[in-house]
């Protein structure tokens, strides 16, 4: 069995695991929707669609939707299940099998990507009543699903690193909180050129900014290749980095 | 200083008893003209103050039809407290250079040689086999922030194909660390380990294909059903979906879990989990099965069931290497035992030989229990043992 097939088999198991614990998915949907409603409710009147150029005729909810999508994609449970497996001994059972170390990492990440596609689609549907549409059309919608799920893979990879290093559920959970500063050091309320200079610099250095801008471009405008290239470039680089670090950690895992 | 290696009945050289207190100036260890492997003289040097090891004097003789080999160890600075159980020989050399062996009914300890009775002229013959497990000078050090901890300090092991080998020791003695090194789950600081003839460090994947592992915690995914878990495990070992389904069914029957097969594992009892864990270690019909405390936490009935499973598995030809805290379990199941303490092997032999050795050495009227052998080997009293915990954190 090739490493790809092994990753597929392990991914299938991780998906089954997710489906059998629907309660773990509830916060993943609830909190992003909550953020969307609250942010739109608080700033919707400040940024009316007809007089705010960066909204391209849509409501402020459309501008906020990428934040909710990234939040949901960053709530992956892969790392917590991994810690559970480490503590319960099943991870050792998998390590004692002739399974490619890459497959051990990619199996869970693959499942996280699939879950993220489903959650992103649900969130987009839930955002429709707030006057949101995907201006880039069906292809843009597909790209939106792919980009969000790739970000889910990147962040799940980061969380798995913490899980493998600490083998602690508490530390892994706390590690996930790093996403909040990253999220708020982005042009999350207004475009980058409207930020103060220090915030603009911070946002420019923050890789999450480029993923957010790519998602925003897909929602607000017809296909714009430049922001998409930057967004996909960031997830590609970070994705490769995370997988490589995970594989290295598993190979040296004692 | 002279040590006698007493041939012990059906399986040969095991225990070593201190015979004299003679002191000699040069450190040399040889048995039957064969130099010990590198691990044993090193251990002698550590334990008994022997400065070095090399060719030396050997006295071998027959007594009552069983081989009796005396080994001279020269140059020790003090009288050893315990037996030199870990002397081991190179099998091929023993066979070639020791005519004594061909006419004995005995089997050399841990050297992968078996004796077959009833051969031509009624004399046993000796044939060589690859040991199921062979470890030499196995060392594991953990580097902590403050200090380096020596969890295993130079373990030599030879487990013959087809036997049930028990690995005993107090908490923190190095049992689990050793088993984790042998099963590729932990890196080896120094030394070598071969399982089913495969070097576990050089080719871990090949070793993984030949071994089954069930560790202390029943390593199961509670959200899967028993059947799903076995199918997944079989697929990871290369079976097609159909083959995996068939193998899972066979194993579920073997461990009597057919009725519970489609229930989630989180609802299984401790005994059911342990049996499923055993089954999952058998999906690929491993040559060597490693079990780390397979019955810990089980009620007596479940424990007996697991014992039966292990006997059945062993009867099918699988070598079993198990650690246990239950000496009765070791007595019941194991062909041979090794006791590890402080990261070093301190006794090795069949349960009967270990008891006989202690009985002889202490001039007891009856055979001691394995508990007494254990306490003697680890230098612990019952009182100390009850209060002592020496865990090594990873």
Image (cartoon, coloured by chain):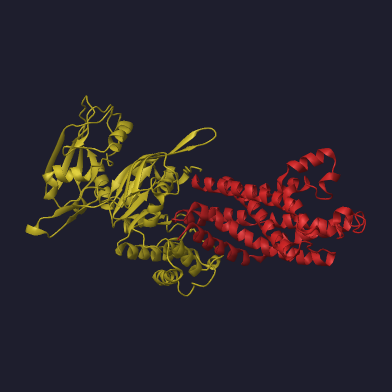
Residue drawn 78% across and 63% down?
A134
Q: Quadrant of residue B346?
A: top left
Q: Is residue B264 left or right of residue A184?
A: left
Residue A166 can be seen in this image: yes
Residue drawn 67% across and 47% down?
A175
Q: Nearer the viewer, residue A160 or B225?
A: A160
Q: Colour of chain A?
A: red
Q: At which x and y percent is residue B202?
A: 38, 45
Q: Is residue B165 left or right of residue B99?
A: right
Q: Residue furthest left?
A: B121
Residue B325 can be seen in this image: no
Q: At which x and y percent is residue A98?
A: 43, 55
Residue drawn 37% across and 65% down?
B309
Q: Nearer the viewer, residue B226 or A124?
A: A124
Q: Nearer the viewer, residue A96 or A36?
A: A36
Image: B347 above or below B318 = above
Q: At which x and y percent is residue A74?
A: 69, 54
Q: At which x and y percent is residue B15?
A: 24, 44
Q: Nearer the viewer, residue A74 or B76?
A: A74
Q: Colour of chain B?
A: yellow
Total tally of numbered discs in the picture: 0
Q: Is residue B266 left or right of residue B235?
A: right
Q: Quadrant of residue B78?
A: top left
């Amino acid at each position: 069995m090739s490493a790809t097939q092994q990753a597929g088999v392990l991914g299938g198991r991780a998906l089954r695991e997710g489906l059998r614990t629907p309660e773990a998915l509830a916060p993943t949907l609830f909190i992003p929707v909550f953020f969307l409603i609250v942010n739109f409710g608080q700033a919707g009147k400040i940024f009316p669609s007809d007089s705010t150029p960066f909204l391209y005729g849509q409501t402020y909810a459309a501008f906020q939707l990428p934040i909710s999508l990234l939040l949901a994609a960053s709530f992956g449970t892969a790392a917590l299940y991994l810690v559970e497996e480490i503590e319960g001994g099943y991870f050792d059972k998998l390590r004692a099998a002739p399974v490619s170390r890459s497959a051990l990492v990619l199996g869970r990440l693959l499942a996280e990507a699939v879950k993220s596609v489903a959650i992103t689609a649900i969130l987009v549907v839930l955002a429709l009543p707030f006057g949101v549409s995907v201006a880039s059309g069906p292809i843009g919608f597909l790209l939106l699903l792919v980009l969000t799920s790739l970000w889910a893979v990147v962040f799940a990879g980061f969380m798995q690193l913490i899980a493998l290093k600490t083998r602690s559920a508490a530390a892994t959970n706390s590690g996930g909180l790093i996403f909040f500063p990253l999220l708020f050091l982005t042009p999350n309320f207004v475009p980058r050129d409207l930020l103060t200079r220090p915030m603009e610099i911070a946002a420019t250095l923050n890789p999450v900014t480029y993923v957010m801008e790519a998602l925003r471009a897909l929602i607000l405008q017809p296909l714009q290749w430049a922001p998409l290239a930057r967004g996909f470039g960031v997830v590609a680089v970070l994705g490769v980095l995370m997988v490589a670090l995970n594989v290295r950690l598993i190979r040296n895992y004692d | 200083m002279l040590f006698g290696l007493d041939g012990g009945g059906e399986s040969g050289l095991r225990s070593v008893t201190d015979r004299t207190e003679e002191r000699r100036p040069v450190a040399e260890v040889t048995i039957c003209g064969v130099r010990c492997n590198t691990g044993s003289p090193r251990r002698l040097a550590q334990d008994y103050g022997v400065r070095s090891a090399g060719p030396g004097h050997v006295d071998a003789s027959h007594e009552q039809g069983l081989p009796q080999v005396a080994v001279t160890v020269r140059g020790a600075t003090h009288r050893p407290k315990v037996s030199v159980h870990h002397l081991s020989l190179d099998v091929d050399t023993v066979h070639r250079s020791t005519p004594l062996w061909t006419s004995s009914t005995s089997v050399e300890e841990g050297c992968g040689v078996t004796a077959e009775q009833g051969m031509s002229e009624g004399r046993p013959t000796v044939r060589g086999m690859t040991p199921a497990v062979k470890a030499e000078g196995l060392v594991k050090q953990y580097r902590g922030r403050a200090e380096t901890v020596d969890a295993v300090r130079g373990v030599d092991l030879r487990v013959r194909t087809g036997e049930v080998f028990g690995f005993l020791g107090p908490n923190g003695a190095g049992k689990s660390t050793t088993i984790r090194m042998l099963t590729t789950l932990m890196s080896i600081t120094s030394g070598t380990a071969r399982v089913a003839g495969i070097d576990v460090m050089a080719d871990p994947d090949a070793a993984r294909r030949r071994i089954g592992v069930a560790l202390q915690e029943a390593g199961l995914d509670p959200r899967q059903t028993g059947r799903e878990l076995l199918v997944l495990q079989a697929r990871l070992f290369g079976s097609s979906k159909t083959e995996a389904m068939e193998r899972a069914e066979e194993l579920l029957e073997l461990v009597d879990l057919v009725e519970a097969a489609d229930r989630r594992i989180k609802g299984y009892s401790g005994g059911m989990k342990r049996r499923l864990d055993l089954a999952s270690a058998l999906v690929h019909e491993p040559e060597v099965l490693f079990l780390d405390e397979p019955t810990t936490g089980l009620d007596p009935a479940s424990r007996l069931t697991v014992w039966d499973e292990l006997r059945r598995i062993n009867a099918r030809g699988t070598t079993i290497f198990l650690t246990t805290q239950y000496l009765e379990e070791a007595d019941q199941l194991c062909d041979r035992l090794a006791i590890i303490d402080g990261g070093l092997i301190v006794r090795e032999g069949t349960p009967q030989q270990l008891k006989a050795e202690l009985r002889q050495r202490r001039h007891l009227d009856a055979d001691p229990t394995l508990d007494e052998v254990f306490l003697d080997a680890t230098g612990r009293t019952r009182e100390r043992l009850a209060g002592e915990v020496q865990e090594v954190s990873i």
